[in-house]
Image: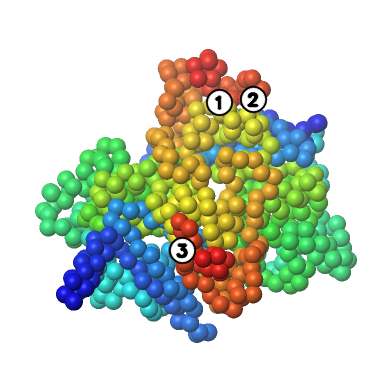
Amino acid sequence: MTALVQVDDLAKVFDVSAPWLNRVIERKPRQFVHAVDGVSFAIEKGRTLALVGESGCGKSTVARLLVGLYGPTRGNVKFDGVDATSLDAAQTRTLRRRMQMIFQDPYASLNPRWKVLDIVAEPIREHGLVTDPGQQRAKVAELLASVGLAAADAEKFPHQFSGGQRQRISIARALATQPEFLVCDEPTSALDVSVQAQVLNIMKDLQRQRGLTYLFISHNLAVVRHVSDQVGVMYLGRLVELADKAHLFSNPRHPYTRMLLDAIPDIHMSGRSRTPVQGEVPNPLNPPTGCAFHPRCPHANARCSSERPAFKAFKGIQVACHAVEEGRI
Amino acid sequence: MPWAGLAAKWAVAMTANATLLEVKHLRVEFPTRRGTLLALDDISFSIAPGEILGVVGESGAGKSLTGAAIIGLLDPPGRIAGGEILLAGQRIDNLPYEQMRRIRGRQIGAIFQDPLTSLNPLYTIGRQLSETIRTHLPMSEEQARARAIKLLQETGIPAAEQRIDQYPHQFSGGMRQRVVIALALAAEPKLIVADEPTTALDVSIQAQIISLLKRVCKEHGAAVMLVTHDMGVIAETCDRVAVMYAGRIAEVGPVAEVIHRPAHPYTVGLMGSIPAMGEERERLAQIDGAMPRLNAIPSGCAFNPRCPKVFDRCKSERPNLVDAGATRAACWLVGSRA
C-alpha cells in the first residue's frame, strides 16, 4: 500500500491586518492567523481519512489547500508521489482532473441559472474528456444514475431539487472527471438525518465501486465513525491526534479527543448526564502558549503552558500531548 | 345528580393543574395565490409544569411553526385557522396583540437558534436584560440590574458584573446563547419555547448549553418545549418527545420508548438513519425520497410514498394518533393491531 496523498508540514497563514492607513494612523500591528500550522498525514489509496474539529480549527483550510484553492505558506502536498505545489499550470490542470471537491452547502455550490446537464458536464467539457454533445449527454445521464437520480433530471434547474438531491448533483459533478481522490468538506452537514443517510450510503457505494480515496471533513464524530478508516483530530490549526478509527473511538488518547467524544449526545444513553468540558475555543489570533488546549485541559501542568508538544508516534497512533507522552494519562 | 357536576368540575380543575400548555387540534394555514397551504394540521399535545417536551422532525415538518404559533409569532400571511392553544387553562391563540405581548416574555420565554440575531447589536447586554425585566416585573433600574447580573451568573457567564456592560459582538457564540437563555428566564416564565437552541453551536459548547438549559429550567420550575432536529439532544434532555412529519404528529411518547421501541415506520426509519456511536454498521438504514412539499402532500397518510410497510388503506385514509403500547402513533398498522 502506498499513500495516494501525502501531506508534509502543511501550513497556511492569513494576513488579517488592518488596512495600511489604519496601521499607520492608529498604530495597529500587523496580524496573522495561523489557520493551519504544520499538519502532516498520508491517505492510502481507497481509504478514507476524516478530519474533525470545531469551527475555526482549520479543517476546511486543509481541504482547500489539498485541492489547490489556496497555496500553502509552508510545506507540501504530494499526490501520487508528485509534489502538487511545484507544478506548472498545465501539469496542475491534469492533476486537477484526478482530484475533485464536494462542498458543504448544496444551495450555494450549484449555479442556479444552469441546468443540471451543464453543471455536471462542465468538468467534462473543461478538461475536454468528451467533446461530442450527444456523448456528453449520455455521460451525464450515466453519472446521474450512479448517484440515484434520473436521466430526465438533467434538463431541470437546481431549484427544482431538494437539499439531498442537490448534494447528489454535486457528487455527480465531482465524479465527472473520474477522479481518484475526493475532498468532501462537510458534505452532509446541511442535510436532514434521513437524507444524510442516503448521501453517506451513496458515498460508500461509490468508494467500493470506483476505489475512491476520500478526505472527509466533518464536525460530527458519529458520521466520521461511520465513513472513515482513519481519523485526524484538529485543534487551532494543528493535528492533536491521528489514529485508526477503531483506536480513536475505543481508546482516545488526547484530552481534546476525549472531550469531543464525551460531548456527543448519544441517543442510546437516554437520561445520562454528561459533565461538559468548560471553556471555549480560544481566539486563533492570539492562541495560548505551549499546548493550545491547555487552558481547557483537565490534565494540564506547567510544562503544557510553556512548551508546545510535538506530534509524535505513540503506541501505533500519533498524538501531540505531554501528558500522554509522560504517561500521566 | 349533584355529584356528577362536582366531579366534572373537579376533573376540570385537575386537568388545569396537570397541564401547563395544551394544544388542541391546531391548524395553521398559509394563504397563497395558488391556494391555501396547510402547514400544520390537527396538532394536539400538552406539556405538564416542569416537563421538557421535545419536538423533533426534519426541515419542513412544521416543528418551528408549532413553536411560533404558541408564542404568537406566526409570520403573516400564516394564520391559525383552527384549534386552540391553552396556557394554564386560558386560551391564548385568539388574544389581541397587546395582551399577547404581555404574556410573551412574562409567561412564555423564547430561545431561538441564532443567538446573534436574537440580540440587539446596538444595546449592551445589561440594557436588553433590564428592559425585559422592567417590562414585565415592577422593579427599579437598580433592582433590574442586580437581577440581570444574577441571571448572567446563573447562566454561567464569568465576571458578570463587568460583562453586563458589553455589547453582543464582544461575546462568543456560546456566551451569546447563555445571554439569550438569561433573557428568556428574565421574568420567570412558566414555559420556555426553545427553537433549535444548540444547532448553531459547536459540539463542546452544545453540551454546555444543554446541561445549562436543563439545570436552570429545573431550578426555575419552567416547562420547556424543545424544538430540534437532533435526536441526540432530545434523548439527553427531554421527558417526552413528539415526532413530526409533514405538518402532523407521527408519534408522541416518553423519550426512551420512542427511541428504543418506535411504533411509527417513520420514527423507525429516522432512528435507523442516525449514525450512532455505539455500533458498527456498513450501511445506514435510509428512508428513500424526501419530505413532501406543502403543496403536494399525498392523500391518506403523508408518509405513504416513503413507507416500507405501506398498504392500500394508507393511500386513501389518513390515520389519527392512537395508543401504540407506551407511545401514541398515527399509523394504520398500529390501528389495525389495536
Q: Residue at x 40, y 48 (%)?
A: B237
Chain for disc number 2 = A
Place of residue B32 in the rendered image (x, y in percent of width and height, measured from the top left): 48, 82
Place of residue A171 in the rendered image (x, y in percent of width and height, measured from the top left): 71, 55
Q: Disc 3, disc 2: CB below 8 Å?
A: no
Q: Is residue A326 above or below residue B162?
A: above
The disc placed on residue A12 is: none
Q: Nearer the viewer, mark 3 or mark 1?
A: 3
Chain for disc number 3 = B
Q: Residues within 10 Å of mark 3 (few under 14, many from 20)?
A: some
Q: Residue at x 29, y 37 (%)?
A: B158
Using the rendered image of the protein, determine whether residue A151 is visible from the camera's viewpoint: yes
Q: Residue at x 42, y 30 (%)?
A: A296
Check disc 2 and report its element: helix, strand or loop. strand
Check the image and name the residue furthest to the top: A326
Q: Amino acid at mark 3?
A: Asp
In the rendered structure, the answer to whether residue B107 lies left or right of residue B289 reads left
Q: Nearer the viewer, mark 3 or mark 2?
A: 3
Q: Residues within 10 Å of mark 1 (few under 14, many from 20)?
A: many
Chain for disc number 1 = A
Q: Is residue A132 above or below residue A217?
A: below
The disc placed on residue A253 is: 1
Q: Are the residues flagged by discs 3 and 2 from a single subunit?
A: no
Instruction: Tell me the residue that label 2 is attached to.
Output: A317
Q: How is the image coloured?
A: rainbow
In the rendered structure, the answer to whether residue A144 lies left or right of residue A308 reads right
Instruction: Tell me the residue that label 3 is attached to.
Output: B323
